[in-house]
């Protein structure tokens, strides 16, 4: 049994994670962390990780990048494995996460969906085959409440493609002020915000007289919740290190 604490327990993703956990027999929710401590199930919710009344086997975090310091402090001091599903981290914060992984198990990915991680693999394969013959553009769509843009998933896709191409590309996020032809070394990144779109990502390879588009669409946040819970169960009893969905998919 994997005992899990949910950071961001009163958010939409936090409640989806709880609903996912309660349907399983291999894990249990023992506590939550949220600035809003209203209790909606049979586990306590506290304002900070330091106030947790019981040490969980794993913490799943879908809160806010502003809470990272306190979360890492708790996990490092107690040796608690951490699954990070939040996005919008700065480069400095990502460096903090990677440093913490030298002491505790950390599962860090920009998207917990199995389908998205398959999309990453397909995009890398396409990039390896098509090389510099095709222009690459990434379009992501999300709901009108999402704060960061482009999405962490779009950045993950771009990074995976760029690594496949020996990091020969640079990212262009906004074209309205660029009155010039597209450079071959670009990966274009485009963010759309509206309505209640859960998450859609298109990777476009545009060549001479042909276009290849790889797409993924999420119909609900439960796909991310299920991925996070699978990651938590996977992470229990692992040694220190930085883990991601590619490792989970591989096993």
Image (cartoon, rainbow, N blue to C red):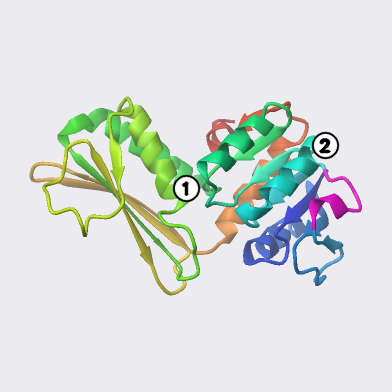
Q: Which comes before the other along the chain, label 2 or label 1?
A: 2
Q: Vertical placement of 141 versus 151: above or below?
A: below
Q: Please state the horizontal and vertical placement of residue 56, each as a whole percent of the image.
A: 84, 45
Q: Residue at x 45, y 48 (%)?
A: 153
Q: Please state the horizontal and vertical placement of residue 67, each as a whole percent of the image.
A: 68, 53
**Is any atom of residue 118 visible in this view?**
yes
Q: Please state the horizontal and vertical placement of residue 241, each as a whole percent of the image.
A: 66, 27
Q: Which residue is mark 2?
A: 77
Quadrant occupied by the C terminus: top right
Q: Which residue is mark 1?
A: 115
Q: Vertical placement of 24 versus 45: above or below?
A: above
Q: CA distance from mark 2 to mark 1?
A: 35 Å
Left-right relation of 113 to 137: right
Residue 121 or 176: which is nearer the viewer?
176
Left-right relation of 201 to 221: left
Which stretch did the figure color magenta? 48-56
């Amino acid at each position: 049994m994997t005992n899990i604490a949910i950071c961001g327990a009163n958010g939409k993703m936090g409640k989806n994670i709880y609903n996912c956990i309660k349907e399983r027999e291999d894990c249990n929710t023992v506590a939550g962390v949220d600035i809003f401590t209203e209790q909606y199930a049979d586990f306590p919710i506290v304002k900070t990780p330091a106030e947790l009344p019981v040490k969980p086997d794993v913490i799943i975090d879908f809160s806010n990048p502003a809470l990272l310091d306190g979360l890492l402090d708790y996990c490092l001091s107690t040796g608690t494995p951490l699954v990070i599903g939040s996005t919008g981290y700065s480069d400095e914060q990502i460096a903090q996460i990677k440093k913490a992984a030298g002491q505790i198990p950390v599962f860090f990915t920009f998207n917990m969906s199995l389908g998205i991680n398959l999309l990453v693999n397909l995009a890398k394969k396409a990039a390896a085959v098509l090389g510099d013959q095709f222009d690459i553009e990434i379009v992501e769509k999300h709901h009108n409440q999402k704060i960061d843009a482009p999405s962490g998933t779009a950045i993950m896709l771009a990074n995976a493609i760029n690594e496949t191409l020996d990091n020969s590309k640079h990212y262009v996020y906004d074209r309205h002020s660029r009155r010039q032809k597209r450079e071959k070394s670009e990966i274009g990144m485009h963010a759309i915000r509206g309505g209640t779109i859960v998450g859609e990502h298109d990777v476009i390879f545009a060549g001479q007289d042909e276009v290849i588009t790889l797409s993924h669409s999420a119909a609900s946040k439960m796909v991310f919740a299920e991925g996070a819970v699978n990651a938590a169960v996977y992470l229990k009893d692992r040694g220190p290190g930085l883990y991601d969905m590619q490792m989970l998919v591989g096993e």
